[in-house]
Structures are given as C-alpha cells and as structure tokens.
Amino acid sequence: MFAYYLQLALRSFRRNPGLTSLMVLAIALGISVCMITLTSYRAAAANPAGERSSILFAPSIDSWDPDRSYERDDKTLAPNMLTYRDAQALYASNIPDRKLIMYRSGEIYTRPDKGMDPHYIPTRMTTRDFFAMFEVPFLYGGPWNEKADAGPEPVIVLSKEENQKAFGGGNSVGKTLNWQQREFRVIGVLDDWEPMPKYFDVSNGAFQDMEGAYVPFAWGAILELGSHGNTNCWKTEVIDSFKAFLNSECIWIHGWFELRTADKQRAFREFLDNYVTDQKKFGRFPRPLNNYLYDVDGWLKRNEVVQDDNKAMLIMAFAFLAVCLVNTVGLLLAKFLNAAPASGVRRALGASRRDIFWQHLTESGVVALAGGIIGGLLGVAGIWALRAWYGQFVKEAPRALPFDEANLVIVVLIAVAAGLLAGLYPAWRIGRAAPASYLKAQ
Amino acid sequence: MEIRPIISALLRNRAGAILVAVQIAITLAIVVNAVYVTQQRVEKIGRPSGIDDQNIFSFWVNAYEKDYDFLGMVREDMAMLRQMPGIIDVTPINQVPLSGSGSSTQFYSLPDKKGENSGSAYYFTDEHGVNSLGLTLSAGSTFDATAVEYQQKDERTQDWPAVAIISQGLAKALFKDEPALGKTLYDDQSDPIRVVGVIEHMHGAWVGWDKLDRTILLPRVGPDQSTQYLIRTRPGEMDRLMTDVETALRKRDPNRVLALPMKKMSNMKRESYAGDSLMAVTLTTVTGLVLVFSALGIFGLATFNVNNRTRQIGTRRAIGARKFDIVRYFMTENWLVTSIGVVVGCALALAAGFWLSNEYQMPRLDLYYLLGGILGLWVVGQLAAWQPSRKAAKVSPAMATRNV
C-alpha cells in the first residue's frame, strides 16, 4: 500500500510541479538555516571529555578583589584561573587520583644542527598527568615520569604537526630541540589530537589552536616564562621580579583533578574550603568563602563556551523553520483541496477515509524528505561558504564550524518529522470530505 | 463597502486565513527583533577606530640568540624600513590595536588611587607611533625622540615612562571637560605620567569592551626580546610591501624570527568583529527569507481564494460590482488577515524582545522597530495580494451562469 501511495505522491508532484517545488524549497531553506546554526551551536556545546567528563574537576576558588566580583555579569562566580601559589598548594593534595597544573606559554625553538627554521611554538607548561587525564594519544614514546616533573628534566613532547616541522616526521624520540639556550630531549610524539572545544583550557577562546609542544611545568619558574594567554591581576602590589609575580595575587594557572569517587570529590571540596579558610589567616582571600569544583560539563557552562549569540541564532533559525512549515501547511492544504475530486473518486470506489489520510500524509512525508535532503546539502554548502569567508581572517573558523554527518542526519529527521506534522491537518481535512460533493460537480 | 461579507467568507475558510495570520505573526516577531539586533551589530562593526586600519600591517619579531642586541636590531630595522618607498611610517609596538590581544590597567586622576579612575588599554611605542597608526592629535604633539626609553633585557622596571599621549576617551574619563594636555595621571602605585598629547579618537584592543576608546601610548622600546613592527603604507601598496619588507628584513639580519604570515590590520579588525558579522549575516538572511515566504503565503492564500470563488465573483460582477470593487474586496480581505497576524505578532515580538534582553543581556527592543515592522508587513501583504486580486477582477460576469 505504501508503495502505491508513493506512486500517487509522485504522480501528484508531476501534476503540480510549481507548487511542489515551492513546498520543497520552503522546507529546504528553513532546514538549511537550521543546519548552519545547529552546526555552530553543536560545535560549541560539545563535550569532548566523554565519559571522563564526570570525574575530571576544575577548582574555582575566590581569591579576587574584596571590592568587586570577578565576573561582572554573574557576581556569584569565582575566578576561572588560579594564582601560582594556590595552584602549587592544590597540586600538593593527596586526595585526587590524578592531578595537573598548567598554562600556555611559548618561545622560539631551534635545532642544535640548524636543520630547522627557528620558529615560535605555542607550548603547554604542565605536569605529567595531563596526558593520562585527557587521554592524549601518543604516536611515539610517551609522557615523562614524576622525576622529570620534580627535577625538572629537560624533556619535551611534540605534537604530530610540530614533529613534522622539526624532524620531518618519524620517530624522533631521543632527538633534541633548543629552547632558551637549553637542550630539550624529545620523549614523546603525539598522534593527531584536537578536542574541540578545547575544554581543558577555554580561557583564551574555546576553539584556540592546540599547542605544538609540552614541557614540565616547573621549567616555567626556572626559565621565567609568563603565560601567553590571559593573566589577570587585581591587587596593588609591587611586582618587580618574576619571583614577585609568582607570589602575587595574579591568576593565570589552570588546575584539573581526577576524582573517581563521590567520597574523593567530597573530600576535595572540603580540602578547598579548608585551604582557603586557612589562607585567610594570612590575610589572603579577602572575599567570603566561595569555592566551586566543576566537572567538565559544569566548567564549559561556567565559562559560557556556548555564547548567547549561538543560542539566539539557533532560536531565530527554528522560528524561521516554523514559518516555512506553516507556509507548507497552507500550500499542502491548497494542493490537496485542489486535487479533491480525485480523492472523491477514490472514496467512491471504496477507499476508506483512513486510506485517503495515509495517502496524503505519505505525500507530505515525501515532500519533507526531499526538502530535508536538499536543505541539508544547502546547509553544507552554506557552512562551506562561511568557512571559506571567515577562514580568511579567523583561524578558528573551521574548528568552530566543523562538518559533522550527525548534523545532516539530525536536520533530515527534523525535516521529515516537521513535514509529517505539517501534513497532518491537510491530510485529515481531505480525508474527512464527503466524496459525493466532489463527484457532483463533474 | 461592507466588511461583514468578507468576515463571513473568511470564517468559511478559517484554516487558510489562520495559517497566513500565524505566519505573519511569527514573521513580525522574527523580523522586528532580527532587524533590531542586526542594526546594533552593524553600527558596532562600522564604528570608526580612529586608526588608519585599512593601510596597516604588522608582524612579530623575536630575538632568540643569547646576548643578541635587540635594541640595536630595532633601531636599524626602523632606519631601513622608514626609507622604503610606499611606507608612510613604521613603529615598534608591544601589541596591535583591534587585534583582540593587549594589556590594560587602571589609571587615576590623582595620586593614592584618588579622583576619577578608568581602565585603559596601553601601548608601548616610539615617537613614530602616532603617525604609524594614522592618529589625529587634537592637542599637543607626538613624543620627542629623546623621551623614548630603550630598555635592555635586564633593565626591566615597574615604573611607567614619564610622559604619555592619551585618547580623548580616556581624557574625558579622568579629567571630564578640562583640557587634558599638561595634566598628570597616576597608576595604582601613584607613579605620575604627564600628558603631552591628546588623540582625537582611538580604539584599543577588545571591541567588546565598553572602554574601547580609552587608550594610552607610552614611549618605550624593550625590555622584552620581542616586539611587533607596525607598518602604515600608502593606499594600494600594502600587498607589495608585505613581500618587500620580509625580504629586506631577512637580508639585513637573518638571525631573528619573523612570525609569518604578516597580518593586515583590516583582517584583525574583521576577526575581532567576526561574531557580530556572523550574527548580522545570519539574521539578515533569515529576515529576507522569512519575508519572501510570508509574501508567498499571502499570495498562495489569495490565489486559492480567488480560484475557489470564481463563480461568486462572476455573480457579483453580473449584478453590478465594478472591477474596482472586486479588487478592493480581496485587498481588504488580505489586509484583515494580515492585521490579525500583526496584532498577534506584536505581542509575540514584544515577548521575544523582552526575553532576548532578559536572557542574553541585549538592549530592550526599540518600539520604532515594531512600528516599522507593522507598516512593512502591511505593505508586503498588500503587494502579495495585488496580483491575485487583479486576476479576480478579470473574472467575466458570464462565469455566474456556468456550472450551475
């Protein structure tokens, strides 16, 4: 029966190609705009941490100015970065299963044998658990050990891309790079790895490029490397040396803590509060006790990775789709009523109201499917065009607008569901009409 | 003319009329809010920066060798580049305005954190900074060459240079309506800085910051072992110079790193406003499409009604209605449907506007936009109904006698 309805639908399209194309176009355009906004929304709303999202925690402790809150919009929030000394203190805790502190820096690297053009490599200064906690894939070698963190030892992990630039690819473990007049030994090379949004450090833009090199955190203090990302300060204090900077109330460090059980999470929360209360005795943390421990999901929300504009555009797009659908309902109604005499004949020949209803609903579904597929493809073309245009001056554009087959599937499903919804009333209306009235006019 | 027969005809075919009215209501809500938000973004993007941002490019220069004479490098590079034909001026600067990265701090009009105060983006540059950025001074002059501090790596101080050039925006925040030239401002440690020049207008680092027009230029090069070179060219010569400058710099001294590609300030500006422009583009597209579809909907309903009522029209014509009466009848019918949609749409638009401003900190919807939207939709509705109405008027009175 379904096949027969399909056949009838196709015949009906041929009878009214203009009207049919209009309906398909209406759905297609509505869907394409949805596809584009959905892509940008879903890219920002993604949580690449997956299952580990609920056991990785970022602390946020309120070390800020007594006279004003850290965020202007939401005064209840605490800073989203740590001071150097607080980061060290939290890192010393034995509660977490794994832990890390880190920041983004970078410098000019050279190769001892001059086999590489000296160039700037964005570098993450971090402790070793970074690789395990974020499940970073290695192509060659592996992370450094605890001794290398404590030393610190001059070891370095390179990204695949940077390994290609420095050594032309291949297993370069054991080779050396020069940095700040020191030799760093390559201990590992990463495989392709680009979680987006860059959830572990969203403070410099959620779609920022990945670092090319990873070096033990402790080198930061030795080589006096500040952050190449945000550094925020509030206190009037004399900062006349790097040491003074490390002891200042400036925030620039990120910390993550793996806490696998509810007990550990509770214990760590208590630890945070106790630490801050303790520090208050030394005149630090002048604001009321206000500490948070965010899992990855909470962290992404805290930092508003999905921007208001993302949401507003998505809402506008779906409102537009709604207009397209109402339009389609009207067009379907006109079309079905136009062809009512044919239904009258079918009814007179014994088709039930239900048959007529399903026949017309099938027709709506086919129109919607066509609109969905065309709209999805239009959407892909639109994304491509936006990426090409914005890519000229926004490095993040391709990462913020990724091609994702899932989005295509989603919008086609939305289209079909919406099309069936749109066809519901017209199909019911035509099924209800008495056959005799149409036959009379013949 | 009687409106009652129109209403009763509409009630007979409720579904079509309701659909079009709903469509118009949602359209009004979308269009009014989208146009309003777009208008704000377009205004934001179009603000003048006070900088000659279409004729400037810049890039980082990093020294990496031990005991490298960084300050000597800057001096020699500057001397060479300032000779190159096509370059208006060039300056070393710690950050580039409009790029989205930079530094800011708090300044005060009196020592000990007293008086007025304001955050401001600050830039370290030399005596060519003003001309290289293409700024207009409203008072004072650029730095004396002797005022520029050249700091070695190990000479880092926490003090600010003794003099500065500030933007009118910062001047107003600190000194209100008094002339700022010759005045002294202070940092949070009461370190004094004397104003030797006032810039008519200049944007700083972050286009989303409400203190974007508060900027201060300070005469210093170093002590960091890296800087940006900011080059202003004659119009149309930028692309050629980007290549020439790279070649010339490499030739003069290959032992430092030029961070490539060089960046045009126009592109940095576009990047800074990318979110706003994407929003504007998306909303404009949606507005255009939604208007077209509403018009199509009205057109479709009118055509359907005309086709369905051929006999009725014929009868009316046969008993004396003029063509004009028929046109007026259908135009009025559509105006009625549009108006119902518009009334519902007003409520919807206001609700959406209220919700947007509440949820997303957007400014409250301006009612003039609503008024414009209502008028616009009435016009669109009447235009869309025009052709079907004309078609109706052409129905021959003889139709009344057919098919009976």
Image (cartoon, coloured by chain):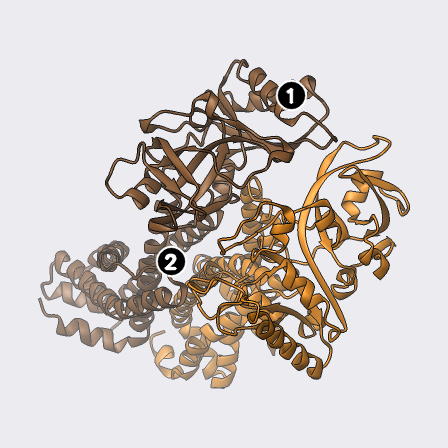
Q: Are marks 1 and 2 on the same chain?
A: yes
Q: Left or right: where does residue B291 sit relative to residue A217?
A: left
Per the image, the residue denoted by label 1 is: B249
Classify the position of the C terminus of chain A by image quarter: bottom left
What residue sits 32% from the left and 44% below the top?
A: B174
Q: Amino acid at mark 2?
A: Val
The residue closer to the viewer here, B359 or A323, is B359
Q: State the image quarter where residue B199 is shown.
A: top left
SS at badge 1? helix
What residue sits 65% from the left and 27% below the top?
A: B70
Q: Amino acid at mark 1?
A: Leu
How packed mark 1 is, by other alpha carbons closer than 10 Å (few <14, some 14-19, many 20 or more), is some
The residue closer to the viewer here, A82 or B348, is A82
Q: Which chain is orange?
A: A
Per the image, the residue denoted by label 2 is: B290
Among the two numbered marks 1 and 2 on one chain, the one whose residue lies closer to the N terminus: 1
SS at badge 2? helix
Closest to the camera, between mark 1 and mark 2, is: 1
The residue closer to the viewer here, A124 or B246, is A124
Indicate the position of residue B368 as horizontal and vertical percent values: 22, 56
Q: State the image quarter where residue A138 is shown.
A: bottom right
Classify the position of the N terminus of chain A by image quarter: bottom right
Q: Please indicate, yes or no, whether residue A49 appears anywhere in the rendered image.
A: no
Compared with A195, B224 (above or below) is above
